[in-house]
Image (spheres, rainbow, N blue to C red):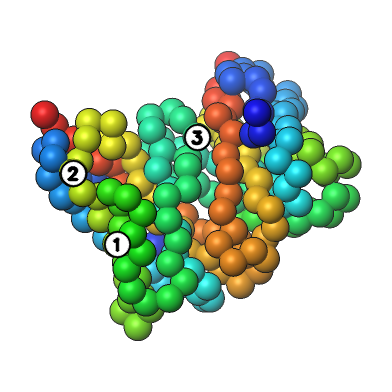
Amino acid sequence: GQSLEQPSEVTAVEGAIVQINCTYQTSGFYGLSWYQQHDGGAPTFLSYNALDGLEETGRFSSFLSRSDSYGYLLLQELQMKDSASYFCAVREQGGKLIFGQGTELSVKP
Amino acid sequence: DGGITQSPKYLFRKEGQNVTLSCEQNLNHDAMYWYRQDPGQGLRLIYYSQIVNDFQKGDIAEGYSVSREKKESFPLTVTSAQKNPTAFYLCASSSGIGGAKNIQYFGAGTRLSVL
C-alpha cells in the first residue's frame, strides 16, 4: 500500500526552529516534495529532494534519507506568517504526487 | 499574470444534481489535476490529464467526470453518483508529469456543499 505519515500538529514560538518529519511507504519513489497551505488557500511548492541529503532555500531546508524512507522539513527563524499546514508528497513513477495528511504548524509569539 | 483560476469559489449542490467546477490555466502547462481535500486531511487525486483529449483516473474517481478539450481548461463534474461531495476541491497544473520535480501550481479552490 501507499502511506505517508506526518505529525498532525506542531507548535513553536517565534524565532525558533521546528522540524516536521515525514515517513513514507510507497510502491515507487522518485522524490519527496513539500508544500505549504495557509488556511483555506492554495498549496504552494516549497522544496524537492530526489537524492539523499539536505536542500536549503532561505529559512527552509528539506532533508531526505531514501534508505530510511524518511524526510523532514526544517523551518528556521520562525515567523508568525509561517503558521500553516505543511504537506509532504511522494513523487511516484509516472509523475503523480501522493500527499500526506499534513502537519498544522502554529507559531506563537 | 500567469496562474490558475477556479470558479466558483463556493458552490451548493442539491440532491440528485450534477455540478461542474471550472479550472482554467494560462501557464501553458501540459498536465492538469483535480484533488479533493476534506477537513484536516491531505489531498486526494481525483483525475489527471497529461495532454489534451486524454485523462486518467486517480485514487477517488468514482462519482466524478472530467474533460480536456483545450490545453488551458480542465473542468470537473461532480455527479449525483457522488454521495458525499462536500469538500474543498483544488485544481493544479504542472509543465509535465514527467518533469524531474513535477512542481504543481494550485488554484484557490472551490468549496462545495450539499443543500
Image coordinates for residue A67, horizontal then vertical, percent: 35, 83
Give a yes or no on whether discs 3 and 1 share a subunit.
yes
The span from disc 3 to disc 1 (Cα, nearest Å) is 21 Å
The span from disc 3 to disc 2 (Cα, nearest Å) is 24 Å
- Disc ID at residue A77: 2
Q: Earlier in the sequence, mark 3 or mark 1?
A: 3
- Judging by the rendered image, the residue that carries numbered circle 1 is A72
Q: From the image, which quarter does the N terminus of chain B lie in? A: top right
For discs 3 and 2, the disc positioned in front in the rendered view: 2
Image coordinates for residue B51, horizontal then vertical, percent: 81, 54
Give the class, few, some or many, for how many residues have Cα within 10 Å of label 2's Cα (few <14, many ≥20): few
- Disc ID at residue A42: 3
Image coordinates for residue A4, horizontal then vertical, percent: 39, 62
Residue furthest front in the image: A58
Identify the residue at horizontal 13%, vertical 40% (top origin): A15
Out of B2 and B40, give the one closest to the viewer: B2
Above or below for A31 versus A19: below
Residue B64 visible in the shown view: no
Q: Amino acid at mark 2?
A: Glu
Out of B28 and A86, give the one closest to the viewer: B28
Give the class, few, some or many, for how many residues have Cα within 10 Å of label 1's Cα (few <14, many ≥20): many
Q: Secondary structure at mark 1?
A: strand
For discs 1 and 2, the disc positioned in front in the rendered view: 2
Identify the residue at horizontal 14%, vertical 36% (top origin): A14
Image coordinates for residue A89, horizontal then vertical, percent: 46, 58
Chain ID at mark 1: A
Residue A22 lies left or right of residue B94; in this view the side is left
| Disc 3 to disc 2: CB gap under 8 Å | no
Above or below for A15 versus A40: below
Q: Secondary structure at mark 3?
A: loop
Residue B51 lies left or right of residue B115; in this view the side is right
Chain ID at mark 2: A
